[in-house]
Image (cartoon, rainbow, N blue to C red):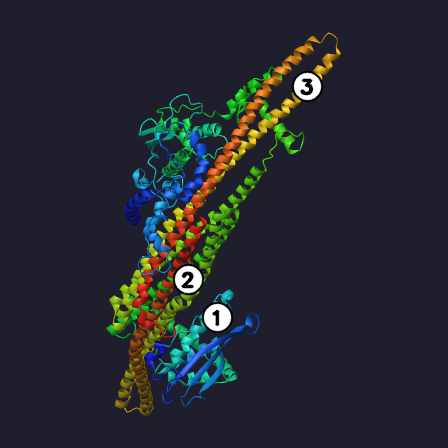
């Protein structure tokens, strides 16, 4: 069973567990290219297996595309402030690779991980939007998606702007530049600093991991070319030497194939998790922005409320007829202010839980990625050693 | 980096000595050795005054004896597939790989000029089987200590006043040389002279090509980098000459290495004065005052020689050959030779391709090592960061895991770099043989030009005979004889005799060159077998050894992180 999923959820994910245990298991499979030309896109089969009451039956299969996942992500981000929403794989990509087998597979894997993380998150798994995503008919989904994108046309820009503002303010804060409305919480300051630094370090590690994949491919290619050249050279030569060169060339070509395979493994099991880690950190930054936003709102409302209070007192003293009006205003404002404070506190509380979960999760995720990496490298090296070693007696025979 | 390389080298010396001791005890009745002995008997007979039964540079000893693959114990284990991977199959590749190659570089790089480029350092020129790692005779030539010197007087060309000389040191125990260690100063011009004289005297042999003349300004000539490049090239060249079974004993080389002061070899005069000399002889020839060419001069190729008329005649001959004119009796019917030539061309083509791909492979290995190292460093930075800023235990655990991976990556990176340094040495054989192709072309060209000379003389003889016949026929018609005609016939007969002599000499020379070609080809075949065998075995052993090391490094990390493994794996 997937340890990652076990760590945080109340549900189990194995359909094999006793039916009394609640479970929710999702898989994203079977990518299929649909449409033509510029309109072409990939659709995925999303299979939900569950015994939960609010779901339609033990198994449900729907067809979804990337923008549906984006919809789900955005809805969750809106509703669950303070939670680190699991990150999505990158949106835009160079046109050339959009339909390459490797890219499709990587994206499918990332989407599968995305949905499963949501399904295993204590808060997020309760989401109505998740239920909709997993069960709604395709037409419904399409309608929702279109509706959201038009309704939120303004919003994302706003959000982005706010995000940018806050991000710059946050980093200003980190760099000690400005001093706008901000929390004076040293632990939180430390966390923010940590997150920003972490992103830089991870990005660099991921860059090198990606390069390493490329190097494997290049080495494979050069072994193939060299093998071919050796064979051609062998064809010029008589008996022993000719045979030796030919055998040598063949072995080199074999190893080339092995290296290409390993490059793919490395990409899926090591580089992708690192990239996923980077995305997760970016998601945390978005949450940090949300928190700053909420804090600012809370402060502003508190300020405004104070002013209104002073004003009200003034009016009451002068027995103005506008007191009633002012009282109502003041009450409303008080409610808003309390609401804002609650929202902020909720974010703070959630974040504190989330950060623990995040660190635990990443310990496991990276542990696994490291294990796969080391295992892969060891296996590759052993294969290489075995292959060349098996050639030695043949070479010996050729030269005697 | 330099530090680690030197470290590796010093380790190698110890193990290499062990290896060489083992190898020396090996009985010399191994297949490689016997295979080569036939072709070298000719050389053996050529070599005079050698007390030793072994020619110091005989390839027959080296390919087998220096081949540790046949001797040492650990290799035998390697070939036993039933052995577990854990311990015994694990060999020390650098030790093995280096015994086969560069047997002479006890102190090459570090010795005089410091910089030992990891790739084509001068010691790699000894990577061919000719290097005697086990025999007791040796010649070791070192080129060092470049110095600027002033041209004294008599310079026709004003302004070219400075040049560079190099110290050529020779260490040898061969009796043909006077003394065991000596040094001379030579400039590049001297090397050109040496090379030209050798080319004349040893036609048909595969003579190593000398370093290029560079047409550069005098300023560049004095630049440190250029001088160093040239020094390396000169050293390689001289060592190759010394490694050639015939050329090492040439007077030209001996004189070059030993005679102090001015090099006492005839200099290759500039073209202008040659033309002049040739033109002086021309009128005599045109007016038929007998052949002013001594028979033995015929032996030298016309091109670059001083005989303009001969040059003209041979040119005419080659044209008529090409156009299938009068068929001279001695024709290049040597089908076998033509086949060999064709094969050689094909070999050269494929060799060139292989050499290129080898370069790509080396680059790919290097890049792999570099990137692996960079990845390791990035993880180390990340580890440090997480450890310092850790607020949770999970971070510390993660940092710990990461550190293991980082350390392994850095170790693996080092292994890749070492592997590559060795790979470069092994695959250098390909480049060396490409260089050898130049020598082969030269030797084949010698043969063609000698043949052309023979054909020219034959055709000359033929026309001379015709003229003589005509004259005799005409003169016999006149009663009492035609005094002037008779005199002319006599003169003609003289010319014919001289030409006959020249022809005999030319034919002998042609045959000699053909024989040289043949023996050199045989030698090359044998050496090629040995050298390529060493290259392949060395390369493969190297790969195995380092792959094992790298596998071990990662296996440890896989073990340490096995707790994270998913059941599905």
Q: Earlier in the sequence, mark 1 or mark 2?
A: 1
Where disc 3 sits, the SS reads helix
Mark 1 vs mark 2, CA separation in Å:
17 Å
Residue A50 image offset from top left, x and y in percent:
42, 86
Residue A344 image offset from top left, x and y in percent:
31, 81
Farthest top residue? B480
Residue A252 image offset from top left, x and y in percent:
45, 55
Tell me where residue A189 sits by quadrant: bottom left
On screen, residue B134 above or below A336: above
Mark 3 vs mark 1, CA separation in Å:
90 Å
* Residue in the foreground of this view, choosing between A174 and B65: B65
Mark 3 highlights which residue? B467
Q: Which marked residue is nearer to the observer: mark 2 or mark 3?
A: 3
Residue B289 image offset from top left, x and y in percent:
60, 14
In the drawing, what numbered circle is on residue B305?
none
Say which residue appears at 29% left-offset and 62% top-offset. Answer: B381
Say which residue appears at 29% left-offset and 74% top-offset. Answer: A182
Callout 2 crowding tier (Cα within 10 Å): few <14, some 14–19, many ≥20 = many
On screen, residue B224 above or below B84: above
Tell me where residue A109 sits by quadrant: bottom left
Q: Identify the chain of the residue marked 2, using the numbered disc in the image.
A: A
Mark 2 highlights which residue? A213
Q: Which marked residue is nearer to the observer: mark 3 or mark 1?
A: 3
Where disc 1 sits, the SS reads helix
Mark 2 vs mark 3, CA separation in Å:
82 Å
Say which residue appears at 38% left-offset and 83% top-offset. Answer: A125
Q: Identify the chain of the residue marked 1, using the numbered disc in the image.
A: A
Mark 1 highlights which residue? A104
Give yes or no for contact between labels 2 and 3 (Cβ–Cβ under 8 Å): no
Q: Are marks 1 and 2 on the same chain?
A: yes
Where disc 2 sits, the SS reads helix
**Lateral position of residue B381 relative to residue B235, left or right:** left
């Amino acid at each position: 069973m997937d340890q990652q999923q076990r760590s945080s959820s109340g549900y189990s994910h194995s359909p094999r567990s006793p039916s009394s245990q609640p479970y929710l298991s999702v898989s994203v499979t079977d990518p299929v290219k649909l449409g033509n030309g510029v309109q072409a896109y990939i659709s995925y089969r999303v299979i939900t297996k569950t015994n939960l009451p609010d779901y339609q039956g033990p198994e449900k299969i729907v067809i979804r595309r990337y923008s549906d996942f984006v919809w789900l992500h955005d809805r969750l981000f809106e509703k669950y402030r303070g939670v680190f929403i699991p990150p999505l794989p990158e949106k835009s990509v160079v046109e050339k690779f959009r339909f390459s087998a490797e890219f499709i597979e990587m994206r499918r894997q990332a989407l599968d991980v995305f949905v499963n993380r949501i399904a295993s998150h204590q808060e997020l798994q309760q989401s109505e939007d998740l239920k909709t995503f997993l069960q709604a008919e395709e037409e419904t989904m399409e309608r929702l998606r279109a509706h959201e994108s038009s309704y939120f046309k303004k919003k994302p820009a706003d959000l982005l702007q706010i995000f940018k503002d806050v991000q710059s303010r946050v980093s200003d804060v980190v760099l000690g530049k400005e001093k706008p409305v901000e929390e004076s919480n040293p632990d939180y300051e430390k966390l923010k600093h940590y997150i920003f630094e972490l992103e830089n370090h991870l990005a660099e590690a991921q860059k090198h991991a990606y390069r390493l994949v490329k190097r494997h491919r290049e080495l494979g290619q050069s072994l193939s070319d060299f093998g071919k050249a050796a064979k051609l050279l062998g064809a010029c030569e008589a008996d022993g030497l000719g045979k030796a060169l030919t055998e040598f060339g063949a072995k080199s070509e074999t190893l080339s194939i092995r290296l290409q395979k390993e490059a793919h493994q490395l990409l899926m099991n090591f580089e992708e998790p690192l990239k996923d880690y980077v995305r997760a950190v970016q998601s945390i930054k978005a949450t940090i922005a949300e928190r700053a936003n909420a804090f600012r709102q809370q402060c502003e409302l508190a300020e405004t409320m104070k002013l209104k209070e002073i004003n009200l007192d003034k009016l009451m003293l002068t027995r103005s007829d506008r007191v009633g009006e002012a009282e109502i205003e003041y009450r409303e404002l008080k409610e808003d202010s309390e609401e804002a404070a609650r929202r902020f506190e909720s974010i703070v509380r959630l974040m504190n839980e989330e950060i623990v979960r995040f660190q635990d999760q990443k310990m496991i995720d990276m542990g696994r990625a490291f294990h796969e990496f080391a295992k892969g490298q060891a296996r590759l090296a052993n294969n290489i050693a075995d292959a060349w070693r098996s050639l030695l007696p043949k070479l010996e025979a050729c030269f005697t | 980096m330099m530090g680690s390389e030197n470290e590796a080298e010093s380790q190698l010396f110890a193990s290499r000595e062990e290896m060489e001791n083992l190898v020396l005890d090996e009985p010399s009745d191994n297949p490689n050795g016997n295979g080569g002995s036939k072709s070298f008997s000719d050389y053996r007979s050529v070599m005079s005054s050698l007390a030793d039964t072994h020619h110091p540079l005989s390839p027959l000893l080296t390919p087998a004896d220096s081949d540790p693959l046949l001797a040492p114990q650990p290799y035998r284990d390697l070939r036993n597939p039933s052995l577990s991977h854990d311990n015994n199959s694990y060999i020390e590749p650098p030790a093995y790989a280096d015994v086969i190659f560069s047997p002479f570089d006890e102190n090459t790089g570090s010795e005089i000029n410091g910089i030992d480029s990891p790739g084509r350092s001068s010691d790699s020129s000894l990577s061919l089987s000719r290097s005697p790692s086990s025999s007791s005779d040796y010649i070791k030539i070192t080129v060092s200590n470049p110095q600027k010197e002033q041209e004294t007087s008599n310079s026709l060309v004003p302004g070219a006043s400075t040049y560079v000389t190099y110290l050529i040191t020779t260490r040898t125990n061969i009796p043909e040389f006077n003394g065991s260690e000596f040094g001379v100063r030579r400039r590049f011009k001297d090397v050109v002279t040496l090379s030209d004289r050798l080319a004349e005297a040893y036609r048909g042999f595969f003579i190593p090509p000398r370093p290029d003349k560079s047409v550069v300004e005098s300023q560049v000539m004095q630049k440190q980098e250029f001088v160093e490049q040239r020094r390396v090239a000169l050293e390689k060249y001289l060592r190759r000459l010394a490694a050639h079974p015939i050329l090492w004993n040439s007077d030209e080389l001996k004189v070059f290495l030993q005679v102090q002061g001015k090099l006492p070899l005839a200099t290759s005069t500039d073209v202008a004065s040659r033309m002049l000399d040739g033109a002086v002889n021309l009128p005599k020839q045109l007016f038929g005052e007998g052949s002013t060419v001594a028979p033995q001069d015929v032996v030298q190729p016309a091109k670059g020689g001083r005989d303009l008329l001969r040059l003209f005649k041979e040119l005419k001959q080659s044209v008529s050959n090409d156009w299938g004119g009068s068929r001279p009796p001695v024709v290049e019917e040597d089908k076998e030779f033509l086949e060999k030539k064709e094969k050689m061309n094909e070999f050269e083509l494929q060799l060139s391709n292989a050499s290129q791909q080898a370069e790509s492979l080396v680059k790919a290995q290097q890049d792999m090592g570099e990137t692996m190292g960079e990845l390791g460093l990035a993880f180390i930075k990340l580890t440090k960061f997480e450890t310092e800023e850790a607020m949770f235990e999970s971070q510390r655990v993660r940092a710990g895991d990461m550190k293991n991976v980082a350390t392994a990556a850095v170790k693996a990176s080092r292994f890749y770099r070492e592997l590559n340094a060795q790979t470069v040495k092994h695959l250098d054989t390909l480049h060396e043989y490409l260089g050898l192709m130049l020598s082969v072309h030269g030797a084949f060209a010698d043969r063609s030009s000698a043949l052309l000379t023979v054909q020219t003389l034959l055709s000359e003889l033929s026309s001379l005979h015709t003229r003589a016949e005509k004259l005799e026929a005409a003169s016999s018609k006149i009663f009492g004889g035609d005094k002037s005609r008779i005199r002319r016939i006599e003169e003609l007969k003289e010319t014919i005799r001289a030409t006959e002599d020249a022809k005999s000499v030319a034919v002998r020379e042609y045959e000699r060159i053909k024989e040289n070609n043949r023996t050199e080809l045989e030698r090359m075949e044998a050496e090629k077998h040995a050298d390529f065998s060493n290259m392949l075995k060395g390369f493969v052993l190297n790969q195995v050894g380092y792959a094992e090391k790298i596998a071990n490094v990662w296996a440890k990390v896989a073990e340490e992180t096995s707790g994270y493994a998913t059941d599905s794996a």
